[in-house]
Amino acid sequence: MKSLKTFSKGGIHPGDCKELTNKEAVKNAAIKSTLIVPMSQHIGAPSECLVNPGDEVKEGMLIGKAAGFISANIHSPAPGVVKEVTDIFLASGAKSKAVVIEPSGEFDQLGKIVTPIDWTGMSIKELQDKILESGIVGLGGAAFPSNVKFTIPSDAKIESLVINGVECEPYLTADHRLMLEKTEEIFKGLEILSKILSPEKIYIGIEANKPDAIEKMEKLALEKGTGIEIVPLKLKYPQGDEKQLLKAVIDKEVPSGKLPLHIGAVVTNVGTVFAIYEAIVFGKPLIERIVTVSGKGIKKPSNLKVRIGTKVGDLIEDCGGLTDDAVSIVMGGPMMGFSMVSLDTPVTKGTSGILALTQKEICKGKETACLMCGRCVKACPIGLMPTRLYKKIAYRMYEEAMRMNLMDCKECGCCGYVCPANVPLVQGFRLGKKMANKQKVKS
Amino acid sequence: MITILYAFISITLLGAFFGIGLAIAGKYLAVKKDEKLYKLERALPGVNCGACGFPGCSQYADAIFEGKVTELSLCPPGGPETLAKLGEIMGVVVDLTKEKEIAQVHCCGGKDSAVYAFNYEGIPDCNAAYSMYQGNKVCKYGCLGFGNCITVCPTNAIVSTDQELVRVIESKCISCAKCVVECPVGVIKMIPVSADYIVSCNSNDKGAATKKACKVGCIGCKICDKKSPEGGFKIDNFLATIDYSIKGERVSAVEACPSKCILPTK
């Protein structure tokens, strides 16, 4: 048997727990109550709110305008009336302005057949503008505005476009189901992308725990004969990060502080490819996404197609509610997600999963002193020294921590996962980055 | 025996040689330091707290001497005495009427009074806690109690209380305001040292919201202003503040306050 590709440095093997939902077809989630649409769902400047309380909104109407280059448009996920514009807390704990929409009136897009738009005649600029207009961001989790990613400087040459179907976070199966159910559409989306970027080669990286998706994609790639290569990857976390994925698929490393563009590569998520397809062919803005609702604390784990702004509590209700032993609700994957405080927190463009975890799944231990065992150093996929970095931050030596490349940490959580002393390493780095930035602003 | 003697003599000679050498060098190669700069350095308290914005006292003295800063009142720990000395050295008339200010924590909603929104299990650090939903209390204006101010205080003037709050020991505070800069919530404010009472609340929420979040929060009811019109109470944004330049009677306001959040400082 051919050995599967993977990245070389660090990484861990958490149990994947995907069997809970990987056979569940995507269902539509109901809109049960008000929708809360935050104005800051993406990396970059928060969008500028265009509506006032009392305004009537239509499905897919622009309610937040991109403010600046790195920002994204936000559209109304449902028809209704704006109840209020208020400040809410996102799952990450950050504050954001949000538009609260009371759904009413008729859905004029849902379920209606729309004639596909012929995009082949459109210029690259027109396609890019359409992506910007539709408010598309990276749906893998980081929510980086897609139009920025696909605006390539004229002197750059794209050698490889790598599509991320890895989904390395345990529990999550949203991308897996998407690849199974919308294979054809993803390939059409790829045609659009290859027109914009004109890459020399397109790869689709999929982890080996999704054999059905790999098989289906491979079959279609062969049928189409487009030269798209499906790359099955060995199971390892955090392979879904773009830098690790590039190392695994094309065996190139992105230098510290640089973008994949530096080595002539662009990485994008399968969900994003599908969203681009829908935006360009059907003119549909990004107002819904697939969310995995899973964990042992959920009665009926499922994959749901959710309107942006739906409250987490409503989704959990859709999945039969919580079991009695659920203790923590996490937005995102178990490795990088945030533990939530309120079930009224809305789903945003970057939400790939909602997990209700039991005490057994969390297995939180008491923090003890660092043993200097070096397991975190071995697990770090970037090659940082978490143990020393954490000490620097604990002693408030932020500048020194920056010199030890603190900013390269992407908070994947491998170090904290392997730590036998339960040191809150990732939380520390998050704090360190924040404080270092604050210090930089001051001086 | 004789070996020890050799060693003794050679070390003595060496010592004498270097000693004389250093004495000569000290006399003839000395860098002349201005008398004024020397005096400036002596006038500053030497705590090296950094409140002036310079790394330490001698850097501030350098800056004054070289004329980079003309402001002499940047040293709060020194107080009027230092200011007077600096003014004398530089030959400038200084304003000595400004009163010494000390830090005070404007929150008394401890674990028995405040309502908590969730259990915070992260790093016990105010900045880390504040970045998650602006702290674990329902009130987003109150003291988080993890004690970052205790860490930065150069004179150990801040202590934590059994209510998971912090308190400033007035006699130890040197008015460097490092805690004010460190506190992510902004609950520590500088007030004149002569202040007799403080409104120990920082909440700008509406009265009803404050009441739900904390038993001892200021609800902006304006009773204090009505009871002690001479007391300098001012209600802005649902929060009472005291104008300390007005020195009227405040006791009746303190007694009338429904949430009992006007506390004596002493």
Image: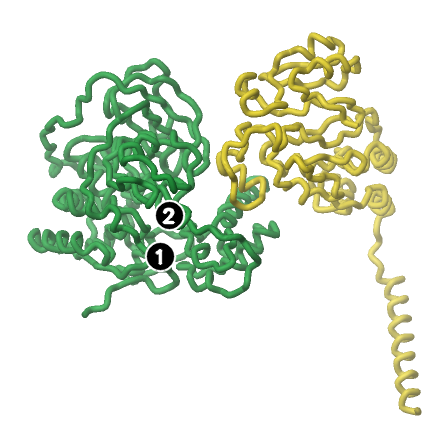
The reply to whether the C-beta atoms of the residues labelled 2 and 1 are less than 8 Å apart is: yes
A362 displayed left or right of A125: right
For this orientation, the residue located farthest to the bottom is: B2
Identity of the amino acid at label 1? Pro
Bin the neighbour count of mark 2 within 10 Å (Cα to Cα): few under 14, some 14-19, many 20 and up. Answer: many
Identity of the amino acid at label 2? Pro
Q: Position of residue B164 (x, y in %)?
A: 64, 37
| Marking on residue A14 | 1
For this rendering, which residue is in front, B53 or A304?
A304
Q: Chain of mark 1?
A: A
Using the rendered view, name the quadrant where residue B266 is placed.
top right
Bin the neighbour count of mark 1 within 10 Å (Cα to Cα): few under 14, some 14-19, many 20 and up. Answer: some
A442 displayed left or right of A233: right
Q: Secondary structure at mark 2?
A: loop
| B222 up-or-down from B156: above or below | above
Say which colour chain A has.
green
Q: Position of residue A415 (x, y in %)?
A: 45, 57
Say which colour chain B has.
yellow
Q: Position of residue A350 (x, y in %)?
A: 33, 39
Q: Residue under label 2, please give it.
A: A334
In primary-sequence order, the first of circles 2 and 1 is 1
Q: Residue at x 80, y 26 (%)?
A: B98
Q: Position of residue A390 (x, y in %)?
A: 54, 54
For this rendering, which residue is in front, A419 or A137?
A419
